[in-house]
Image: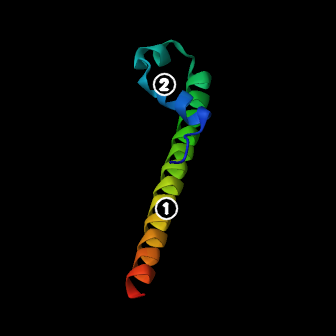
Amino acid sequence: MQRLNPLLLLLLLLAASPVEAASNLSADHRFWAVGLGLLLGLALLVQVGCFLQYQLRRRAVQHARHARRSRR
């Protein structure tokens, strides 16, 4: 199984933190925090997509190997 990126684990921890902490930020800092959150969210989606593609490819290879073995 592919390991998760440590940066993405940090993102998950930050996403689990209370939302009230963002209310203490100024508007400019809030803008950058939202932008960074969206960027990290996109990175998480890419990581999950790559992981799912890896799983599907691995399953297809295993299926092809099994089909080749059963034909012999």
The amino acid type, in three-letter code, at marker 1 is Gln
In front here: 51 or 58?
Answer: 58
- The outermost residue toward the bottom is 71
Residue 30 screen position, x and y as percent: 55, 25
- Residue under the image location 49 percent in, 61 percent down: 53
- Residue under the image location 48 percent in, 50 percent down: 48
| Relative to 10, residue 38 above or below | below
Ranked by sequence position, the earlier of labels 2 and 1 is 2
In front here: 45 or 5?
Answer: 5
- Residue under the image location 47 percent in, 14 percent down: 21
Residue 19 screen position, x and y as percent: 41, 20
Secondary structure state at the residue bearing disc 2: helix
Secondary structure state at the residue bearing disc 1: helix
Identify the mark at residue 13; answer none if there is no mark: 2
In front here: 43 or 56?
Answer: 56
Considering the image in quadrants, where does the C terminus appear? bottom left
The amino acid type, in three-letter code, at marker 2 is Leu
Whole-angstrom CA distance, mark 2 to mark 1, is 25 Å
Q: Quadrant of residue 10?
A: top right
Q: Name the residue carrying label 1.
A: 53
